[in-house]
Image (cartoon, grey):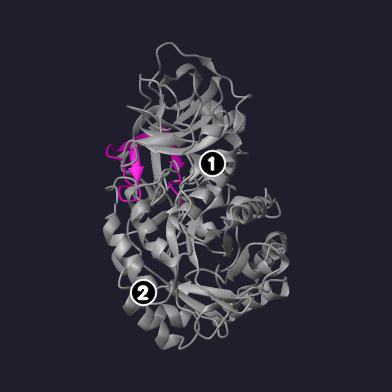
Amino acid sequence: MNDFTVGDTEFLLDGRPVRLLSGALHYFRVHEAQWGHRLAMLRAMGLNCVETYVPWNLHEPRPGEFRDVAALGRFLDAAREAGLWAIVRPGPYICAEWENGGLPHWVPGHARTRDERFLRPVQDWFRQLLPGIVSRQVDRGGPVIMVQVENEYGSYGSDATYLRWLAELLRAEGVTVPLFTSDGPEDHMLTGGSVPGVLATVNFGSDAREAFRTLRRHQPGGPLMCMEFWCGWFDHWGAEHVVRDPEDAAAVLREILECGASVNVYMAHGGTSFAGWAGANRGGGELHDGPLEPDVTSYDYDAPIDEAGRPTAKFWALREVLAEYTEGPLPEPPPPPASLAAPAEARLTGWTPLDAVLEARGGAEVSGPVPPTFEELGVDRGVVRYEVTVPGPRQPYPLIARGLRDIAVVYVDGERAGVLTEEDERLKEPVAGHARVELWVESLGRVNYGPRCGEAKGITGGILHERQYLHDVRARGLRLDDLDDVSDVPFQGLDGGTGAPGLYRGSVTVRGAGDALLELPGWTRGFVWVNGFDLGRYWSAGPQRALFVPGPVLREGENEVWVLEFENAAAQAPVLRSA
């Protein structure tokens, strides 16, 4: 048993000063069979601690429906076996470039405030989650040394009553290790996000000395810590791939450590946002209220340990700095996981249209005067088909999906009429009545940061024909999770590919299974499953051009593959290549 405390100037372990050299690694973005390897990579980089968020929406997709909450405990056990301490950041909000910042789509009331409608489900969730953390605290022989209160709250709000309530809840449920908050190194953020009596830490990617000076104005004593040292960054669909020079990152890390501070490298290993869990940002500068910027599936983050778990040039540069602050020689990196031995092309043999997929695996149809949102249909990640009739006879008028979030493929009388987006809600060609209109709307990821976190998805402002609202809307949703099993979907034979949207089924024969990349040349936008495991979204918009396939997902010989394409399929089949 150990005693980890916050001293006047340093962290103390059993009364002795200790510096935390931590790295972020999200258990939910790494296949469980590869946790041990990734944790060993952290040790080899010179780290003594691992940090992870906990995504509430992953573990409670519907109210009271809890899924594998024990996964966090298994990860913490793996951290202890790897010789690492652990920092846990349970939220309830986590940001993390994760769908809705980790908040469930169904969460009621004013999120991240003292609204009782929000606090009640938070309390229920924490009572499910916290026993697995409490039992693994360092004073009980486990690895957990600190637990965070909320996350970067000062970037969002100023409800001090809510933050105090959350800290008190953590204590009441048995958290005895030190609590902390983390915010940007700005006065308004530290003012809004700090809790009296709770250690404040700061997040930044550069100018360490100035960041710590700002922190000291708000917290004269206690250890200095950068809880998120941004050594890389994330990517958005349709934008350029972001990279950071390894030597630049190493120089800032050195500056942090020269200040006598502890550090958490964010991300040490990013992993992958499988199954459509990637979030989205809003552009528009500091207000984060502009155009939607959905995050790509890969969360490689230009991290020192890449998406496939291999050391990069940044790994070696940071390791060189960290080695100066550790006792004894660092362990060598473990051998990388096996990669796919030889390329393999999938053979697609079946196809079924989206309507048939919806009929087999979709939710119940809802009819009403206005389009229901995804949230009202119980759809977190997936697609909703909206149907409406343009009465007639009437002359052609513009058709508008007002308040569209996020992208819609539109059909008029069964013929494709165009693709609408939030920035372009009007069909290019007017629609005459009488006509039957279908809009297949996909969520590209809920906003995970800023004032528009929690906004609804779907057609949120109505369907307009000229200036007239079209009522009597029929809607039916398809959740991604409901496609993990397609045994009851009626497929028809595929001769050379249809090119049409729909669900494609086939197989790929693997020799020498291992980590792989799945390429879909010519395909437009959709999702891929291998042996029932959802790899995430692909999109020809780039910059991501292939999906990471963890080796444990593949098996020797034949593997099932199905592809859900929303726009245009390609004649060329998906191809597996070595990672």
Residue 504, x across and y down, in percent: 48, 23
User: Circle 1 is placed at which residue position?
Assistant: 475
Q: Which residues are magenta?
A: 419-445
User: Circle 2 is placed at which residue position?
Assistant: 258
Q: Which mark is residue 193?
A: none
Which of 97/465 is in front? Answer: 97
Q: Quadrant of the N terminus?
A: bottom right
Q: Is residue 336 in view from this perspective?
A: yes
Residue 575 is left or right of residue 199, and the answer is left
Residue 71 is left or right of residue 279, and the answer is right
Given contact means CB atoms under 8 Å apart, are the residues at marks 1 and 2 in contact?
no
Query: Eyeballing the image, is 170 above or below 449?
Result: below
Q: Amino acid at mark 1?
A: Ala
Query: Eyeballing the image, is 574 above or below 128?
Result: above
Which of 143/323 is in front? Answer: 323
Residue 441 is left or right of residue 369, and the answer is left
Residue 264, x across and y down, in percent: 46, 64
Q: Quadrant of residue 565?
A: top left
